[in-house]
Amino acid sequence: MRITADTDAESLAAHVGADTHRARLRQSEARRQRLQRNARIRSGNWDLEVTIESDAPPAAIVPTADGAPELVVSGREVPQPATDYDDREWDLLVQKALTMHEVGHLRYSDHDDFARRLDEVPDAARGVASQVWNAFEDGAVETAIQDRWPNYRTLLRQLRANLLDEAGPGIPDPRRGGYVFPLAHAIVCGVLDATSYDSGTYERLLDPDDETMHFVDEADRSLFEDEIRDRLEEAVTDVMTEPNAVERNRLVFEFLEAVLPVVDDARADGKAQMAARRGNAWGCPTTRRSATAAKPNRRRPLWRTWRKTPNWPGSR
């Protein structure tokens, strides 16, 4: 609702009341129980706890003192610039989709293996490595969810469409207008558009005549086209057809080993921006937040309570 000098007090009061009611619903015990019941059914883990926090990131998995998993879902409002659901219906759909996304990581990802591989990446490049891995793994996990539960296909895609409504990883360019993409951001954009939701941004970025999405200069564009583009497309094919979580991680980090030196050579590499976004991924969040930062008494790593090589739909 846009408030102007002509807005009458009754309409304003009704709007404020509706927003307050929406917030209560998003954080209600009934909503929590509904999300928890669904998460337990889909994950097959009847010890899984779901909580709703008003100031939480969209969704995250945290370790607990006794090793049982806990899934934290945000109670915050998520705008829907790309869809037009009833507000309260949209709130529920968002929380269902975010919960299911995290359940998918519990079923299909191997974070222990990922953490070991990330530790071997130089500190300055870990932000890039984490964001690129998250983009690949989100795509693989959401594909697995949609194969297993087709009724989530539209919901997950609509959530992505709203979260990536503008340029996703692009950075507003005050000098040229539109969005500029350092090389690391271009990689994440390419992975997201190829694996999760095709926003059209990557295609526009690769079009030299489209100034709304661009590299910092022609040298960076040539570097990406010559040294990264083909490798990225090959990695997408390999990762998205690999059912084993550890093997997917290996493929992603092999790709990173090949492209990180190229990123280092760019005029705009994007490493500092990626480092600043650790734990705040585009489209969907990272799947595990710091136990010490969020829950001081929780120290046992969550992923050690799950299988090392999760079953993939259709795999033997």
Image (spheres, helix red, strand yellow):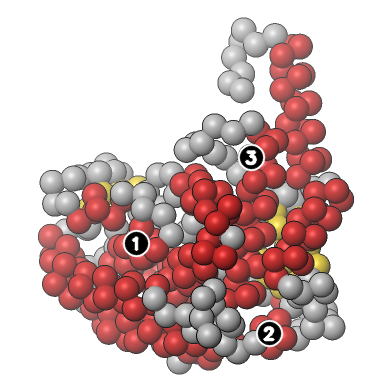
Q: Which residue is mark 2?
A: 306
Front-most of residues 211 and 138:
138
Tell me the residue at 70%/9% (across/down).
8
Q: Is residue 10 left or right of residue 279?
A: right
Q: Which residue is mark 1?
A: 194
Question: Would you say the residues marked 1 and 2 are in contact, meaning their CB atoms lie under 8 Å apart?
Answer: no
The location of residue 38, given as percent across then percent down, is 75, 59
The location of residue 60, given as percent across then percent down, is 66, 66
Is residue 267 visible to us here? yes
On screen, residue 263 above or below 193: below
Front-most of residues 112 and 261:
112
Is residue 277 visible to us here? no
Quadrant position of the N terminus in the picture: top right
The mark that comes first in sequence, 1 or 2, is 1
Classed neighbour count for the residue bearing mark 3: other residues with Cα under 10 Å, few (<14), some (14–19), many (≥20): some
Q: Secondary structure at mark 2?
A: loop
The location of residue 12, given as percent across then percent down, is 71, 17
The mark that comes first in sequence, 3 or 1, is 3
